[in-house]
Image (cartoon, rainbow, N blue to C red):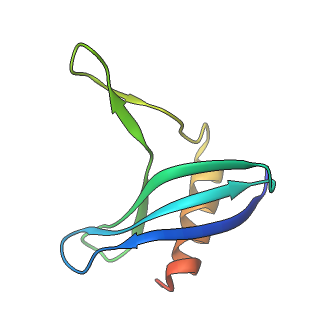
Amino acid sequence: MEITDVIVRKYFSSGPLYAVVTVILDGVLAVHDIKAAKKPNGALIAVMPVRTDSFGRNRDIVHPVDDGFRRSLEREIAKKLDIR
């Protein structure tokens, strides 16, 4: 699966949340509402979209299955946001 585009939906100027993005995979699948947040060391972390169920528990809507893809995802988002 290849990340073919990252679209920035919204930037934030303060706090750890940096932006909200949409990621396009293989040019055919869009994953909306991925939050790009800054760790205390300045690195970026991709926070996957979640929803709250009827019991008040947060459930992932989508998430990477392995660390390699998560790192690729975070690297591509950071590249789009020009975060080193």
Position of 81 relative to 18 (above/below): below
Q: Nearer the viewer, residue 48 or 43?
A: 48
- Up the image or down, 57 lies above or below 84; here it is above
Q: Is residue 26 left or right of residue 50?
A: right
Which is more toward the observer, 6 or 79?
6
Q: Position of residue 24 (x, y in %)?
A: 68, 57
Q: Residue at x 61, y 36 (%)?
A: 65
Q: x, y (%) of residue 23? A: 61, 58
Q: Residue furthest front?
A: 9
Q: Quadrant of residue 45?
A: bottom left
For residue 52, what is the image quadrant?
top left
Percent of width and height locating residue 44? 41, 69
Residue 19 position (above or below residue 30) = below
* Residue shown at the point (24%, 81%) measured from the top left: 13
Residue at x-position 26% and y-position 22%? 57
Q: Residue 69: horizontal and vertical position, in percent?
A: 65, 51
Tally of numbered tags: 0
Q: Residue at x 78, y 56 (%)?
A: 2
* Left or right, 57 with reference to 26: left
